[in-house]
Amino acid sequence: MVGVQQRKLAVHDLEIGMFVSDLDRPWHETPFPIQGFYIRSQNDVRALVSHCKWVMIDEPETRDSADVNLPHVVGFRARSRQRAKGREEIELPPLSIREPVNHKVSTTLKKEIKTSRKLLGDAEGALERMFDSVRSEAGVDTRLVADVTRKMVKSVCRQPSALLWLSRTRQYDDFVYRHALNTSVWALVVGRQLGLNEGLLNHLGAGCLLSQVGKTTLPIEIVESEQQLSVEDYEVFRTYVQRGVEVLKPSGVSKAVLSVVQGHRERHNGSGFPIGLGGERIPLLAKVAGIAEFFESLIAPREGQEPMTPAKAVGLLYEMRNIEFQKDLVEAFIQAVGVYPAGTLVELNDGSRGVVVSHSPERRLWPSVMVLQASEKGSFKSGRVVDLARYNEARTQAEVLAVRECLPHGTEGLDLMALDATNEPRWSLGKIFTR
């Protein structure tokens, strides 16, 4: 098997296509949103030159058959590179939000989790009732969805980590409800990061909640097998977007909400559906919804399919910037949810294991982690939340506590759903969340 070796290289010698695996300074002191990335343009080279003198690059130990053996060389990274290979990049002018709002965190994570615990259950119930009305052709009443969306927007504006945490640790009985609800939460957190006002966030959240309604009109066997469809069945599946639009039009939802429903599967390079829009022709809210929906499908696929760790999904999004998703929005997504989003299972460099609760925008590689399995060293007791950014203040490099690796879904002893299986956390919130 071909291996990987690191090579130190001056930044002025970098070339497009190289994989930068380390820098001459801490990653959190640079603007690069993820640790480790392919150089895909001269802009990437210029950014590295402006911040570093040298970097470490990954390269195969043998060059003889690099293209054939890349999947064995770098695993996930190679697959994401091949995914983008041959696809034209589309660069738009920098994203400009009209009159952006700087949403201040106005409450603690502990308080907001208590406040919003019932909210996701209400959202699930509203979606279930609306979907049932579509199936029975009794007409669509979206008022319950609109009411729930307003409450979700208020929560995300007050404290963006609470709903993310709750949605990642809550068990749902129906995949479509869970997918729509979690997509909405991811999208609202990103919209908040962009500075969208509450009116736009309401349109965005409602559009995401309603984005899957067209699937209720498809044969159930197609919906349940959407990742493994024949060419013919996939053509039927693609119609769910327009079917959803047609179902919702008579209900009186706003054009902004309909644009989210209609555009959430379009892609920056024109490869999406139902119309094949690209670039500036895709409405902004639909672009945000598209990234959120794609991310959720990676980390929480249907039963029987292997989920991707959130950190790897973030890396894949980064590889797809200006290809399937606009660069500015990808970077805003990463800034909003972190390199290790809430719900990511991790092992720290002291051997302890746990789950990411929230992240620090200023220290993207140092999230807050709830320790579920203490290390043999016994640094932290099980059930404690460690804010790595705060813990590492004034510590030397040798003393820094950091994420060693992300762990796969289902790692023994790290069951996310067990944290909140009956609407009550296994750990006492009063003891855990001290921020």
Image (tube, grey):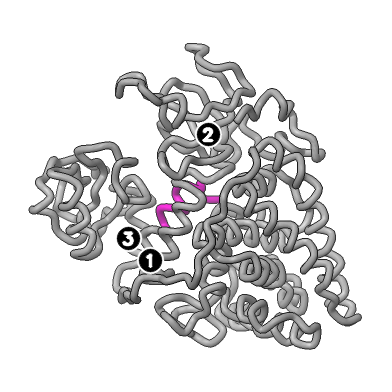
Q: Tell me the SS state at disc 1.
A: helix
Q: Tell me the SS state at disc 3.
A: helix
Q: Tell me the SS state at disc 2.
A: strand
> Residue at position x 45%, y 79% from top?
271
Cα gap from disc 2 to disc 1, whole angstroms? 27 Å
> Residue at position x 20%, y 48% from top?
51
> Toward the viewer: 418 or 64?
418
> Residue at position x 79%, y 87% from top?
250
Residue at image mark 2? 368
Q: Earlier in the sequence, mark 1 or mark 3?
A: 3
Residue at image mark 1? 327
Residue at image mark 3? 81
Q: Position of residue 176 (x, y in %)?
A: 72, 63
Q: Position of residue 155 (x, y in %)?
A: 69, 52
Q: Few, some or many C-alpha atoms within 10 Å of disc 3 (few <14, some 14-19, many ≥20)?
A: some
Q: Position of residue 21 (x, y in %)?
A: 26, 44
Q: Position of residue 302 (x, y in %)?
A: 65, 57
User: What label sits on residue 165 in the rendered view?
Assistant: none
Name the kind of residue labelled 1 in the image.
Lys
Range of residues picked out in magenta = 307-316
Name the kind of residue labelled 2 in the image.
Ser
